[in-house]
Image: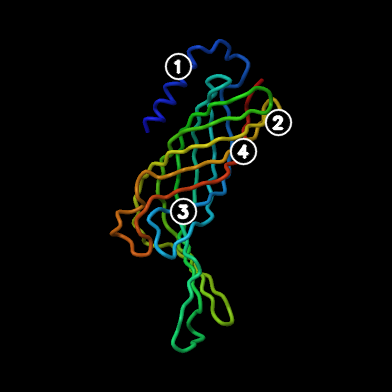
Amino acid sequence: MKLLIYFLLSILTFKAFTQDNSQFNKFQFGINVSPDYSFKTYRSFYERPKLGYTTGLNACYQLNRRISLETGLQYSNKGCQTETIDIVLNEPDPAVPNQAKYIYNLHFIDIPLKANLYYGSGKSRFFTSIGLTTNFYINETQTNIFTYPARRERESFITDADLRKVNFSPTLSFGFDYQINAQNHIRFEPTIRFALLNVTDGASLINLPSGKLFNAGLNISYYLGGAK
């Protein structure tokens, strides 16, 4: 948190020395999608990371050619899954699966706030970002995959998991921004997000023990607006 405050103060100080803000559009709007590798700390023995994603709308305010502030409205799918677990029976039973796998999808509405610092000039620029995302929990869905001797069954349902309603996730990224033309540009941005608080207090759930959610993915964004 101290690092974020220091970064934002540096931005405001830098802005005071900017001489020419007249040659670019200050407001930019975009969409993004990020396939994420999602996992949780304090994992159980069979627990493994799973593929999730983040997607939504963004608004960016360009303070000057080097620095911008960004926010948006995002939907994210986080969580974890188990490895495929062998079910050993004393006697074979066609009504009982041989293997089972459980996938826990945690759904959130996210509101990010971050600062971007750009390097270089021209159409291709690198940038770094630091920010904080507020995560609003929606619900948890569980998918069970059962493998029988002659078939495989998959079922999904909404659980009654009572998880933490609001969490906060610092965000770090480093990326590449390419200006397609005067009004359009695209970003490729490897991103790390890590929750500050546990998903639960550890007493409300048996199937999903307490832990902090982590996400690492490639955020791809398309923006309307940029240098004139």
Earlier along the polypeptide chain: callout 2 or callout 1? 1
Q: In the image, 209: left or right of 48?
A: left
**Element class at badge 3:** strand
Mark 1 or mark 3, earlier in chain: 1
What residue is disc 4 on? 188
Q: Secondary structure at mark 4?
A: strand
Q: Which mark is residue 209?
A: none
Q: Where's the C terminus, which quadrant?
A: top right
Name the kind of residue labelled 1 in the image. Answer: Thr
Residue at numbered disc 1: 13
Q: Which residue is mark 2?
A: 180
Q: Three-letter amino acid code at disc 3?
A: Phe
Q: Residue at x 55, y 19 (%)?
A: 64
Residue 116: x, y in percent? Answer: 52, 29
- Sooner in the amino-acid sequence: mark 3 or mark 4: 3
* Residue furthest to the bottom: 91
Residue toward you, 166 or 119: 119
